[in-house]
Amino acid sequence: MLQKIQRFAGAMFAPAMLFAFAAVIIGLGTLFTSSVIIGPLANEGTTWYNVWSVLLAGGWTVFNQLPLLFAIALPIGLAHRQAARCCMESLVSYLTFNYFINAILSAWGSELGVDFSAEVGNSSGLALIGGIKTLDLGMVGALGVSGIVIVLHNRLFDKKLPDWLGVFSGSTFVYLVAFFVMIPLAFLTCLIWPKIQIVIRAFQVFIANSGAAGVATFVFSERVLIPFGLHHLLYAPLYYDNAVVQGGIYAAWAKALPDLASSTAQLSELAPWASLTATGWSKVFGIPGISAAFYATAKPGRRKKLLALLISITLTSVLCGVTEPIEFTFLFIAPPLFLVHAALSALLSTTMNLCGVVGVFSGGLIEMSSLNFIPLAATHASTYLTAIPIGLSFTCIYFFVFKFLILKFDFKTPGREDDFDQSIRYGTKEEYQSSKNKKRISKSKQAAGPSDDRDTLATNILDLLGGKENIVDITSCVTRLRITVSDPELVADDQAFKKIGTMGVAKKDKAVQVIVGMSVTQVCDHLQDLAGLEQ
């Protein structure tokens, strides 16, 4: 069950990968169309304003169509085969579902307690999905329909039909069945969801008014769920759905940017609901403290090589907000350190919140700049300047706490292992296979020409997973390969995976996670090819 939940969480993260670029466009577009900041050049109707309005309209694509993106994305990680066709089936079934809701509420909306003549948005409980006026189900509807279609696809896509029905096989058969499943599902949704919306609104009020205690609890919980790959499930409903504010915190914040940019009131007063996105402060200020502690406690002869590793993974965290490469270097070696990290992250985020530093701060500096610093600096620079001494103070706290604990309990953090020299570089295929007395280069790879580092890494990972015969399926998350194996006993230990250039491995029964880094998508493609699996 945990394996399935992890795959679900990983699939949900696929649309979120688009947010970084979309956020940059929205942040710049908001900045350059604000006459309060830019001056008369940005007045409505000028060429400057019109050009940036076009770019800004395109930047809103991701946030305006989130349910559609999630409906399409789920099959990427959960369809057993022909995932691309399953994405198509999911999309058309989800649109069909919303057309059914539209027709039902148009005919019987008043009897079901829904004012379908109301404008979409706000408290109406209605939304536009792909141009269809329907109930505002947020991600729940998209994921629910997509999940049903995935189950149907996995069971029916390869089902053999009589020859005279052959034209209905494959994707057509899946959609045929899904079409009739959507009818009762739409009726039940119209009957039940308006009541659920009342509960959701009450929950929104509760979370929005929970203050610093809510921030601390949320940030700590988000960190401790990372080892299980389930942290996406915690924050996704808040960030991208209606759990806290209409449309999700990200979309609501982006839409509010023009008003925030023109107001000098405290951001904590203007948008208190944004406080739960404070998970990024530890990525910017905490991780550098951890890296410095690793360097200071490393054996002197190993610090030079360690520094090259630490610079890379620290910049990944600070700039991109991806912490897994460094967190997985000590997560399984020293679990108490990770709990301390989670506690300090919560304390740092809560301190920022209490000092009035509120905004969308869940990513790294690139995302923070595009959604906060750049568009809002003119009116809220003092707020952001407040964050610097607080953050640097916590960098020092992180450093001294981690250094003390590492030395006190002799944790084998990077630079303190027995075979460190091998663990921080990519081994070549020839070196690794020679050490295992193997010489296996496939004809297909010979024909393809020389392989790059990602191809080499994929080959070595396959060996450590027990070979292609031990692989059931492979998917990827933002930095991790998620693999299901037949025999977990054939999977090598964490140290062996570090020797070939990964950040380590996490194993839970037949579910294996290999932490690769930001090139994980390309490595996953190579690995699927080597294992003979469909992509």
Image (cartoon, rainbow, N blue to C red):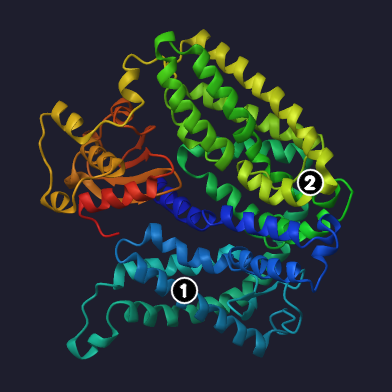
Q: Residue at x 40, y 63 (%)?
A: 75
Q: Position of residue 170 (x, y in %)?
A: 29, 77
Label placed on residue 377? 2
| Residue type beneath disc 2 | Ala
Q: Position of residue 171 (x, y in %)?
A: 33, 77
Is residue 414 among the parts visible in the rendering? no
| Residue type beneath disc 1 | Leu
Q: Position of residue 206 (x, y in %)?
A: 76, 50
Disc 2 or disc 1, which is closer to the eye?
2
Task: Give SS at disc 1.
Answer: helix
* Closer to us: 463 or 233: 463
Is residue 448 among the parts visible in the rendering? yes
Q: Residue at x 47, y 51 (%)?
A: 9
Q: Quadrant of residue 148?
A: bottom left
Task: Give SS at disc 2.
Answer: helix
Q: Residue at x 56, y 67 (%)?
A: 67
Closer to the chain start, of discs 2 and 1, is 1
